[in-house]
Amino acid sequence: MFNIEPVTLRFILVSGIIVGLMIPLFLILVLVFERQDYYEDAVADVAQAWSDNQSFSGPMLLAETKTEVRTSTSEFKTETLVLMPIDLTLSLESSHEMRNRGIYRIPVFSATVIATATFAPVAESSLPGELQNAAIAVGITDSRGVRSATIHWNDDALEEQTSSQMGAIGNIVKTELSRSKLIEGGTVSVKVELRGTGRFSVLPVGDKTVVSMNSDWPHPSFDGRYLPDEREVTDSGFSASWTTHALSRGFPAQLTVTEFDETISALRRNSRFSSDLGFSILTLNTPYRAVERSIKYGILFVVMTMIGIICIELVSRTQMHIVQYGVVGVGLVLFFLMVLSLSEHIGFGPGYAIAAAILASMNTAYVWFASRSPSVAVSVFSMLLVLYVALYVVLQLNEYALLVGSALLLILLGALMYSTRILRADSAEETADT
């Protein structure tokens, strides 16, 4: 039958152990996804009770017109136009607090939005029909979060406000306006106190829109169709400002409600966050993304560790039982489970450090007793220390992760070449002695 050399057989058996370790590693990855789903359920639960993402649109003017349709029965067609302001200035002041759901702490915000919009006079001849009614509309995605809202027209308070729906904008706060005021033009001032979870954004509806945001949240993720022109992020919060113009808005200054709905829907299909601008609350206390990436690199980590132990064996002329390889491999996989469980409570960095210290110490002590060689144990500890540090560095370097990973593979290849360079010579000497 086949005559397999002991070293070759050892490589084959260790390779089988590595393949077998991929199964529990995959199960831990599935567990990460499951725990992430639990976190997202907690966020949804808080958003349901507090308020969801908030998108602010407006102020805008609504003009209802009636046009006679020339038929034998002289019917009339009614449609509503949406008129955009020529200038819109909006400011946001927000503060954040944490809400607890189980082991999770979910950030939510309370905000005060002040918007001032200037509307040009409207020539009745520019309307497609006879002007019937007029109104001011302010879009607020989740109206459950509205604590108070005041609307002024040229310093006159408009008290009667209603909540309704407006196509792709969603919920709107609406107040009636006299036809004469719409025709004359004027300034709308809006102050809204609201709360939300996750994200705040603004739809820049003005021919010129100037937006400024100030918040005490120190980890914003600016997103949407427009990035800030200026921004400053500190440990105590952030400030940011945007300026947009009519040509970049994506829709004209006057269009029907149906056209407006279709335009916003089209922009939403072509862009992740439609035509808006704003920020999302970047939650750094969720370790799942980092743990997921660590497990994906864990395949390389397990391979490098097991091959590294073989190389140490070959160089030191010691030998471990194949079962002991399996025990060390189980410890390598258990490391990622410990990282996940610790990170949920104390964060990824501290959890990673504690898990690495525990598993490196346990594996080193086990190899010490298994090999009866202090030098082998020291070599294994040094190798694990280097690999744990290298894996953490790779996880922090998104742009250079591939480069660092490739360098580690080259180092592994060099170590393997060095430790196996005399295998053929040993085999020849054994054959000659025989």
Image (cartoon, rainbow, N blue to C red):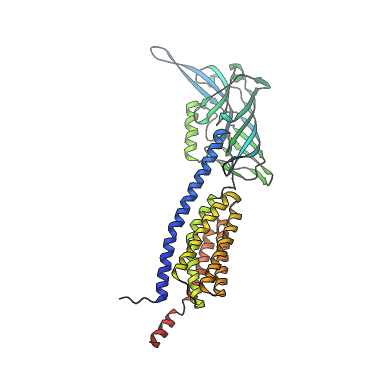
Image x and y of residue 95, in percent: 66, 37
Instruction: Look at the image and tell me whether residue 123 can be seen.
Output: no
Q: Nearer the viewer, residue 417 or 2?
A: 2
Nearest the eye: 121 or 285: 285
Q: Residue at x 62, y 31 (%)?
A: 194
Question: What residue occupies the far left of the structure in this picture?
Answer: 1
Give the residue displayed 62% in from the left and 20% down from the top: 184
Percent coordinates x, y for residue 399 in the rendering: 55, 56
> Of all residues shown, which one is farthest toward the bottom?
433
Residue 103 position, x and y percent, is 57, 44
Side of 5 where 125 appears, left or right: right
Q: Quadrant of residue 397?
A: bottom right
Q: Residue at x 54, y 25 (%)?
A: 82
Q: Who is closer to the viewer here, 65 or 291? A: 291
Q: Is residue 373 above or below residue 58?
A: below
Can you see residue 37?
yes
Q: Residue at x 43, y 64 (%)?
A: 17
Q: Is residue 325 left or right of residue 215?
A: left
Residue 177 figure quarter = top right
Q: Is residue 254 above or below residue 224?
A: above
Quadrant occupied by the N terminus? bottom left
Figure label count: 0
Task: Say left or right for 316 vs 90.
Answer: left
Place of residue 252 in the rendered image (x, y in percent of width and height, measured from the top left) = 53, 31
**From the image, which quarter does the C terminus lie in?**
bottom left
- Looking at the image, residue 188 sits to the left or right of residue 21; the answer is right
Above or below, 59 relative to 303: above
